[in-house]
Amino acid sequence: VENLPMERYERMSFAKNHTFNGVLYIGYHAKEGSFNGVMAHTYNSKTIQYYKINGNDVGELEIDSWAAAEYGFAPLFCSSDDVCVAQALRLEPRLQTVITKYGTGRNSANLRTSDEVLQEMYLKSILCAGMKNTPKKLVFPVTLEVRYTRAEDALKRLEKTRKYGIETEFGADTHILNRISTQIAEQVREEIHRYQHNRQNGQHLGHHKLCSEQHCIDI
């Protein structure tokens, strides 16, 4: 949830001041709960058990790709373990990918040699220069469900979001929070349009705050 007065990192916020044709994901992890995903997590492995958008379990790859799409660019590359790479290819089958290791558990893996991995990353990153993947935006309205490990963490988030006028409800139990996002706020939509206009005209983008419900969907 954006526009809350709290310390936070906006997903893809680096795109505000630059022009990009695509994004390369390096060192990402599989989503929380993935079998054999090395250090698998979604934002915070201690507090969050899953994120669901429209009933589908999603991770940081999906959310960051939706955020990037609002800036007008798409993922081109992913390097990670075999589990995360498989998830990335389901998101965008045309990605260039490099498997850096093969997961055997959350905290164990069979590693490839660094020389082999770096060489493959170099060659495939060159191929990305000619790629033109299509950004895939979220289609609103969307439903969001987040399950927290501890019920008190869910309650704190519920109270905080309600305090700032964001409709949030408990789900099937006290660990789950649900909400429905109907659209990007109009102010955010105007900011995105301004960014895209400046990008098309080759103008340098000064610092400005751009935030939307899907850039970091953390109720």
Image (cartoon, grey):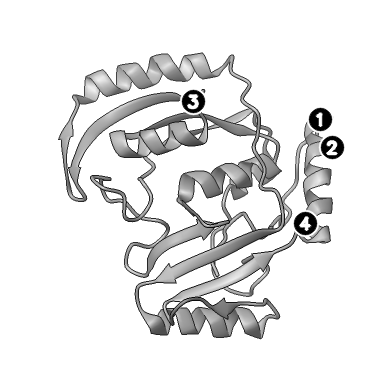
* Image quadrant in which you'd find residue 46: bottom left
Horizontal side, residue 92 vs residue 112: left or right: right
Q: CA distance from mark 2 to mark 4?
A: 14 Å
Which of the two labelled residues, at mark 4 and mark 1, occupies the earlier sequence position? Answer: 4
Three-letter amino acid code at disc 1?
A: Gln
Give 43 or 140, whichever is nearer the viewer.
Answer: 140
Residue identified by numbered label 1: 200
Is label 4 or label 1 in front? 4
Q: CA distance from mark 1 to mark 3?
A: 25 Å
Residue identified by numbered label 3: 95
Q: Residue at x 37, y 70 (%)?
A: 47
- Residue 140 disc label: none
Specify few, some or many for label 1: CA neighbours under 10 Å numbering under 14, 14-19, or 20 or more. few
Which of the two labelled residues, at mark 1 and mark 3, occupies the earlier sequence position? Answer: 3
Please tell me whether mark 1 sits on a helix, a strand or a loop. Answer: helix
Three-letter amino acid code at disc 2?
A: His
Residue 52 position within the rendered picture, expressed as x and y whole percent measured from the top left = 50, 58
Residue identified by numbered label 2: 197
Please tell me whether mark 3 sits on a helix, a strand or a loop. Answer: loop
Q: CA distance from mark 3 to mark 4?
A: 29 Å
Is label 3 or label 2 in front? 3
Three-letter amino acid code at disc 3?
A: Leu
- Residue 188 disc label: 4
Q: Residue at x 31, y 22 (%)?
A: 118
Q: Residue at x 53, y 57 (%)?
A: 55
Which of the two labelled residues, at mark 3 and mark 2, occupies the earlier sequence position? Answer: 3
Q: Residue at x 80, y 34 (%)?
A: 203
Please tell me whether mark 2 sits on a helix, a strand or a loop. Answer: helix
